[in-house]
Image (cartoon, helix red, strand yellow):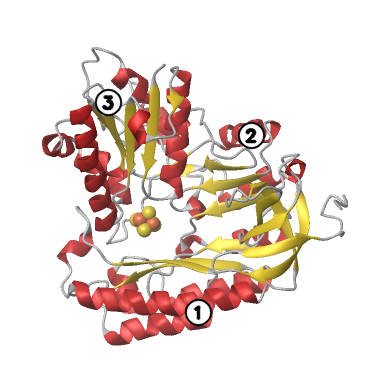
Amino acid sequence: MKSFKILTFGCQMNEHDSEKLAGLLKAEGYRESERLEDAGLVLLNTCSIREKAEQKFYSALGKLRELKELNPSIKIAVSGCIAQQEGNAVLRRAPYVDVLFGNQNIGNLPALLKEGADMRVSTEFAEGYEHAVIPASRESVVTSFVNIMYGCDNFCSYCVVPFTRGRERSRRPEDIIREIEELVNSGCREVTLLGQNVNSYGIITPPSPSYLKRGTEGALLKNIGERYCDFPELLRMINAIDGLLRIRFVTSHPKDLSDSLIDAMATLPKVCNAIHLPLQSASDSVLARMNRKYTFADYMNKLGALRDAVPDLAVSTDIIAGFPGETEDDFQATLLALENIRCDGIFAFKYSRRPNTAALKLSGHLPESAKDERLYKILELQDRIMQEKINARVGMVEEVLAEGPDKSGEPGRLAGKTRQGKIVNFEGKPELVGQLMQVKIIEGKKHSLIGELTCRPDRSGVTHI
Ligand code: SF4
């Protein structure tokens, strides 16, 4: 039987793409291998958001070369952002790669793998790919990722995404609702809606003129500027799906965080009290050079309104350390902001040069040592804040969705998440998976909580012990 192993680098978008790739391969009769060495096909689903991610990919590819020398029948496939960005350059550097395809060409994998296929590479930006339905082989039954849009139009000056994932395209709401209803029928209870900027969801992308046949230009003009619906409306529709218990979403661009989204988060009971709201820097001059289109004051005003409207809101953010031209004062402003905002989690990285991006041309690139030092200080500060926030939950009774067995493998223990998105491990029977529990938090660990089931009923009124 044909077998495969997928190695995934990068973000949740890539994780979900890997679920779709696994779904496609299983439909073609492949089975998933536990071990890389046993797989007939090894697929690297890559990330190019930072230089380090790219280095990790090339190092993994180097190891696969050794594997292929020992067993030449192994096929190696490369997908994702590096495949899209580098294209044939990957094949020149690693000619032992068998097939390579971009983010929009996932559906072409079976054709690329066919014996005697005349094509090895597929990286063209595909028209209408956002409407394609690719059944995913999902990691979890209880919680699922659902794409609501692809690509990005924001062109932040440091970011490759608009070049690797293309321009922003939204899926039709009816397709999203149908997918979630089907997931719920299969046992899903929580969805995480995925998009590079979910807050701008809904703009209808008309087909390009070259795609339309002569005489159909009217159809192109008709859709310009139209929306399917906006993101808060989409949340309302999803909130109405019977059987679904929770809704999360990533990522929210601060410039597009509207009053109506704040209202939706405050009033829709299934929308969790958690938001990932990337700040990147607290210096207005750095934000302007990043092309983020908000000031630090804008960010704080919106976050303040959100925190006023949504009680006990968990906030996570992204920070770039050592952006070109970042002065010591700029950096200190960011540290102070983090101290004041008190995020529940951050993704902090040092700035790295990415191909095609506007920041390459900026002056004032900092030495690696200065960026390392700033990153270290950010992470040190955040570690303390996060631990304080975790410890502050001890003694509280939280609503937890039981997602599956505890990762430690200890029998009789379950893992789940609070509405804020914090991981909780607790003793419980396997039949509780997929249900909302009331769990008393008894201990704070480094990145998670330990709890015990209480006798209090959950939201549906069911008492579990
Ligand atoms: S909003 Fe900016 S950082 Fe986020 S994906 Fe788009 S260009 Fe990249």
Q: Can residue 311 be seen in this view?
A: no
Secondary element under disc 1, as helix, strand or loop, is helix
Mark 2 or mark 1, which is nearer the start of the sequence?
2
- Mark 1–mark 2 Cα distance, whole angstroms, equals 38 Å
Residue 142, by quadrant, is: top right
In the image, 352: left or right of 424?
left
Residue at the spot 48% in from the left edge and 73% down from the top edge: 299
Quadrant field for ligand 1: bottom left
Q: Which of marks 3 and 1 is nearer the N terminus?
A: 3
| Cα distance in 3D space between marks 3 and 2 | 32 Å
The residue nearer to you, when weighing 242 against 13, is 13
User: CA–CA distance between discs 3 and 1?
Assistant: 46 Å
Question: Image check: 140 left or right of 116?
Answer: right
Q: In this rendering, does residue 151 appear at all?
A: yes
Q: Which of 236 and 66 is in front in this view?
A: 66
Q: Nearer the viewer, mark 1 or mark 2?
A: 1
- Outermost residue on the top side: it is 116
239 w.r.t. 222: above or below: below
Instruction: Sort mark 1 into few (<14), some (14-19) or many (20+) by Cα contacts within 10 Å.
Output: few
Give, as a three-letter code, the residue at label 2.
Answer: Leu
Kindly state the secondary structure of the residue where label 3 is placed: strand
Q: Position of residue 385 (x, y in %)?
A: 52, 78
Q: In this view, does 160 lie to the left or right of 3?
A: left
Residue at numbered disc 3: 75
Total marks drawn? 3
Residue drawn 67% across and 59% down?
A: 419
Location of mark 2 (residue): 183
- Mark drawn on residue 384: 1
Say what amino acid the circle numbered 1 marks.
Arg
Q: Residue furthest left?
A: 92
Reply above or below: 11 against 223: below
